[in-house]
Amino acid sequence: MKYFLQGFKAPKVRVVDAVSCRQQQSLVGKDGRKPRVSVACFPRNEDFDLDGDDDWDHFSVSGASVDVVGSSDAEIDMFGESTSGDLQFTKEQKEIKNGVTSLGLEGSVDIASMEYEELKDRCNHVLDQLGLNMADAGMDTSTTYPHGMPQRAIFCSRTLNLRSIQAIGYDMDYTLVHYDVNAWEGRAYEYGLSSLGNMGCPINGLTFDPDLVIRGLIMDTQLGNIVKVDRFGFVKRAMHGTKMMTPAEVRFSYGRDLVKLGDESRWVFLNTLFSVSEAVMYAQMVDRLDEGLIPYSTCPQSYEALYGLVKQAVFNAHVEGKLKAEIMQNPKKFVRPDPDLPQTLIDQRAAGKTLMLITNSDFQYTQCVMSHAFNGHLEQGKSWEDLFDYIIVNARKPDFFRSDQSLYEIVTEDGLMRPVRSMGKGGHKMYCGGSAKIVQQALGFSGDEILYIGDHIYTDAALAKLEFKWRTCLILRELEAEIVALAGGREHRRFLKSLLDKKERVGFAFNQIRVHRQRILSQGQSLSKEMYEKVQEYNRVLAELLIVMRNLDEDIGPAISTDGNAFNPRWGYLSKAGVNDRSQLQKQIEKYADIYTSRVSNLLQYSPFVYFRSPTQSMAHDRRTVDHLVIERMNSDDD
């Protein structure tokens, strides 16, 4: 499907029929800002004057006037979000106040008592009547999910009004440009492994295993382990080298010690998919070190020194530029274009948002992979650069967010640069280096007026939020596989929960008997015959219940170890750690990402005007299953 970016200063607009209207995706001006005219849908073709109406967000109907809320007029709504970008009545007509015929309501107050499913059906009917339910184009408005796929939903940690966002910044790698992980990381692994071989490490027989690790794990460079940690910092699963450790081995190695990510000399968090090849190499080299195959002259018998060696090998692979040169020579092998992505950005610019590309990649590489990812889905003669107001290469994140860096303007098509002090407004828009501070000065926006979207939990999400209070969106492509695995694993989770509930119930009875037995024996007196027989009966029942709980444990243990196997047989789910807790990765996501999703194009279904609201959070003491008992007790107390 081709998407079109057209000029907007013609005084008239061609009016087309409804079918042709649905085929026309968007009109965007040469500068990417909001067009002054739009395509209207009428039953016949004719030229039609817009009578000077020059703003998409301003219109009149039945005597009522509607306009957009500007930043200077914005207020704070009940959820603490700015109303900037919302639509409001500037002149309200009685006919509209008294009836909402589109939804079949005599009065808008009727909606409070209407069942949700009925309201959903009526909203879908309105979209159908307007010809906007374009399932054939992947825009099935009968569901909020992109392409009807729940695994492509957008998930909200903190309420975010996208209407009030004035500028959106994008990372490139694994954000706007998605790679075939096995192809990209596989080649990165091979280049890194070759570098290790040149350093004197034995590499014969080693191959890339993409399932050996997942994002969100942590390398323990002191003990040579890779661990999965819960939200509190306790290790729940661990692997030494390439061998998974037993729960007893995990407890012996870590006990109740907490993993402290601030200690970067020991702990290395796998923030992105770029970390996969490095972690695989490290695990395999730990095996070789344990086997005594790595010469002391190459690496002392130290897991810390070994990690330094692996890190250097990965660095060499990137610095030498062989991998990126190979990708530029054959981007089709590595890059996976998303046909919905161009329209997503077109809609955002048409909604008046300033778009920025901020990438650590260099100019030539960015040109190559962005052209491959976008240009084939744009109107002939248009390029990916037309989608952005500002493009910044060699941004050097995280320093981009932490310090002032020199800024250069790219002035020729082959990447020649000149130093500048600031980013201009309009005109030339491609730069090298700089900082988030310079970006804010150029935009005239700051804080929660800016949304930054990337795949790195630290350099994209955490620093943008901590240093500049930007709103953030995290991209995790693996989320789609995780959600499919979670859905397929529901029955297993129910089985595991039933086993745990049974053990808890048997354990309650066991503990009651044990404490009563303790009370009898702690009296310090010789027992009567009756008490003696009672203790003997307690002993018998306790022994039998012990057998029951032991048998339950024999089922519970394997059920826990296989939980999440559909996602990864070693590590389970991305978001879970232990039986019922969140992983450290999920904690980081919820802490630093206002919203998160699997790919940028998922925003297309939601539109640039969506208001994301975070769902109700569960708490240990908030249990619907006991509400009836609480209410019954309250009523009995009142009586």
Image (cartoon, grey):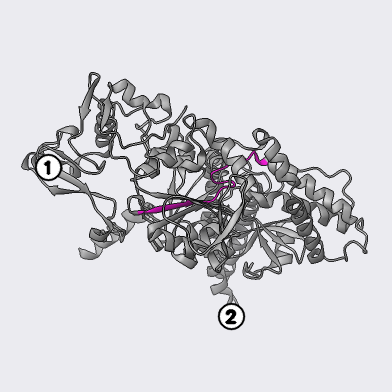
- Compared with 120, 542 (above or below) is below
- Taking depth in this image into account, of 10 and 501 the one nearest to the observer is 10
The quadrant of the rendering that contains the C terminus is bottom left
Residue 74 lies left or right of residue 201; in this view the side is left
Q: What stretch of residues is rendered in magenta?
A: 165-181
- What kind of residue is marked 2? Gln
Q: Which residue is mark 1?
A: 64
How packed is label 2: few (under 14 Cα within 10 Å), some, or many (20 or more)? few
| Vertical comparison of 319 with 478: above or below | below
Mark 1 packing: few (<14 Cα in 10 Å), some, or many (20+)?
Answer: some
- In space, the residues marked 1 and 2 are separated at their CA atoms by 91 Å
Q: Earlier in the sequence, mark 1 or mark 2?
A: 1
Which of 639 and 6 lies nearest the eye of the viewer? 6
Residue 525: numbered disc: 2
Label 1 element class = strand
The one nearer the camera, 454 or 506, is 454
x and y percent of residue 297 in the render?
A: 93, 64
Q: Check residue 489 in the rendering and tell me which mark sits there, or answer none.
A: none
Q: Is residue 563 visible?
A: no
